[in-house]
Image: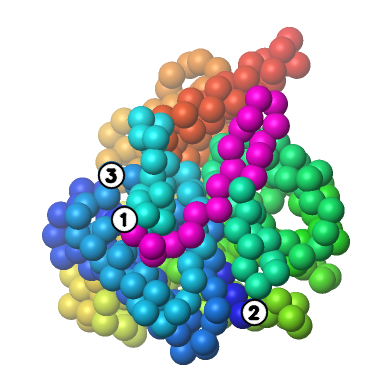
């Protein structure tokens, strides 16, 4: 059986504000990236497509988004390609009992392998296709580890594929993002699975380095413009057990780091692809500030879709009059430092926390992340005393 594994399409995503050309273009980018993968599935004559969570960017999607998503999945159905999909954290909303993944199954556009907590143990309802059992573990937040531990203990044969919305971290205490698991949890599946189709993180990842069986293909399009690693999809052959990673088709995103001393020459001579998004980081050790309006005007005239300018001041002490010249992140850090409390002592970590919270869709995730961070700070205070 030939399987195409993809994840984190994030359909219906728009930049903050959701108005104007840039917002509309980025909204369409996610569908174009998904459409490319659908067409590749047809071209490569795969038997099955796995979507391991975050098909949608949120649960309250627009009618247009649902229509366009159904249209994409119908292409696979018309070509007799089955689709297995699970819920990611963005697909779920606590106030709803069913997600749109449930709806797509009712429309016969996807198969939804389910799991649920029964007392103290997770139970699983696998889908069997051509002698292979597919187990789905939709996003369980901080219970992802528990769910996977229960699943690994219940498997006694190798002919299994697990679909889960999670990513591997070295230490759960070092990440602010819930739903991750440790390598030890995944190691328990060794010799019990053919493949683990994961998601959640947005860059290509495989584990272990030798004879890997845990894979994240990466989001097809940039969910966050700071994402830099490989993004794509994976085709896996269950007979040969060979996998191939393919890059996705996404909008061009370029990041440049330059000095304040030569920024005008750099901008004037930069080649720009039509529709390109440009991140420009300008280092200003002297405290000078670039002409951002001129930079944007030059690059837009060359065909760029969006320009993000970040000015980095080194070795400077900032006062309230200088804050207007800082990046948003630096302004936040200065405000946090002015609080004079436990968060101020850890301004860098607090700033990272705020950035993470802004990206969360579910209220439960917000609470879990903040509680964990606060507990860590309080433990640090005890150690200092």
94 or 361, which lies in front? 94
Q: Position of residue 360 (x, y in %)?
A: 43, 40
271 or 114, which lies in front? 114
Name the residue beneath numbered marker 1: 13
The stretch of residues the image draws in magenta is: 107-124
Q: Secondary structure at mark 2?
A: loop
Q: Position of residue 5 (x, y in %)?
A: 56, 70
167, above or below 220, in the image: above
Q: Secondary structure at mark 3?
A: loop
Q: Hey, which quadrant is residue 95 in on the image?
A: top left
User: Is residue 269 found left or right of 336 in the rendered image?
Assistant: left
**Viewer can see residue 10:** no
Q: Position of residue 132 (x, y in %)?
A: 69, 67
Q: Position of residue 43 (x, y in %)?
A: 46, 89
Distance from Cα at disc 2 to Cα at disc 1 = 33 Å
Residue found at the far bottom of this picture: 43
Q: Quadrant of the C terminus?
A: top right
Give the mark, 2 or 3, whose residue is nearer the N terminus.
2
Name the residue beneath numbered marker 2: 1
Give the mark, 3 or 1, whose residue is nearer the N terminus.
1
Q: Secondary structure at mark 1?
A: loop
Instruction: Mark 2 vs mark 1: give the one in front.
Output: 2
Q: Which mark is residue 60?
A: 3
108 in magenta: yes
198 or 151, which lies in front? 151
Residue found 74% across the figure and 81% down from its top: 239
174, above or below 234, in the image: above
34, above or below 308, in the image: below
Residue found 45% across the figure and 85% down from its top: 42
Residue found 51% across the figure and 15% down from its top: 341
Give the mark, 2 or 1, whose residue is nearer the N terminus.
2
């Amino acid at each position: 059986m030939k399987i195409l594994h993809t994840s984190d399409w994030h359909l219906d995503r728009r930049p903050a504000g959701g108005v104007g050309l840039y917002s509309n273009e980025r909204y369409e980018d996610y569908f174009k990236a998904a459409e490319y993968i659908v067409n590749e599935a047809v071209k490569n004559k795969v038997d099955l497509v796995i979507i391991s969570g975050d098909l949608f960017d949120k649960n309250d999607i627009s009618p247009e988004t649902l229509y366009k998503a159904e249209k994409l999945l119908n292409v696979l159905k018309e070509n007799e390609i089955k689709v297995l999909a699970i819920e990611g954290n963005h697909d779920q909303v606590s106030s709803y009992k069913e997600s749109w993944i449930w709806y797509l199954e009712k429309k016969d556009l996807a198969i939804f392998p389910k799991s649920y907590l029964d007392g103290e143990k997770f139970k699983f309802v696998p889908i069997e296709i051509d002698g292979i059992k597919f187990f789905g573990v939709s996003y369980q937040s901080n219970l992802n580890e528990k769910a996977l531990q229960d699943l690994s203990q219940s498997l006694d044969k190798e002919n299994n594929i697990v679909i889960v919305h999670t990513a591997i971290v070295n230490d759960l205490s070092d990440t602010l993002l819930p739903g991750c698991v440790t390598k030890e949890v995944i190691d328990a599946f060794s010799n019990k699975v053919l493949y683990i189709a994961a998601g959640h993180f947005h860059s290509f990842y495989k584990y272990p380095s030798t004879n890997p069986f845990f894979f994240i293909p990466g989001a097809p399009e940039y969910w966050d413009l700071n994402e830099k690693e490989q993004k794509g999809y994976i085709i896996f052959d269950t007979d040969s057990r060979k996998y191939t990673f393919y890059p996705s088709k996404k909008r061009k995103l370029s990041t440049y780091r330059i000095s304040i001393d030569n920024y005008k020459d750099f901008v004037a001579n930069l080649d720009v692809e039509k529709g390109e998004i440009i991140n420009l980081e300008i280092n200003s050790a002297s405290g000078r500030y670039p002409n951002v309006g001129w930079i944007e005007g030059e690059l837009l005239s060359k065909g760029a879709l969006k320009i993000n300018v970040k000015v980095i001041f080194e070795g400077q002490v900032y006062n309230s009059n200088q804050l207007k010249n800082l990046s948003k992140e630096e302004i936040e850090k200065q405000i946090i430092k002015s609080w004079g409390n436990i968060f101020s002592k850890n301004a860098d970590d607090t700033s990272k926390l705020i950035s993470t919270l802004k990206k969360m869709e579910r209220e439960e995730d917000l609470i879990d992340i903040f509680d964990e961070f606060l507990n860590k700070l309080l433990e640090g205070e005890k150690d200092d005393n």
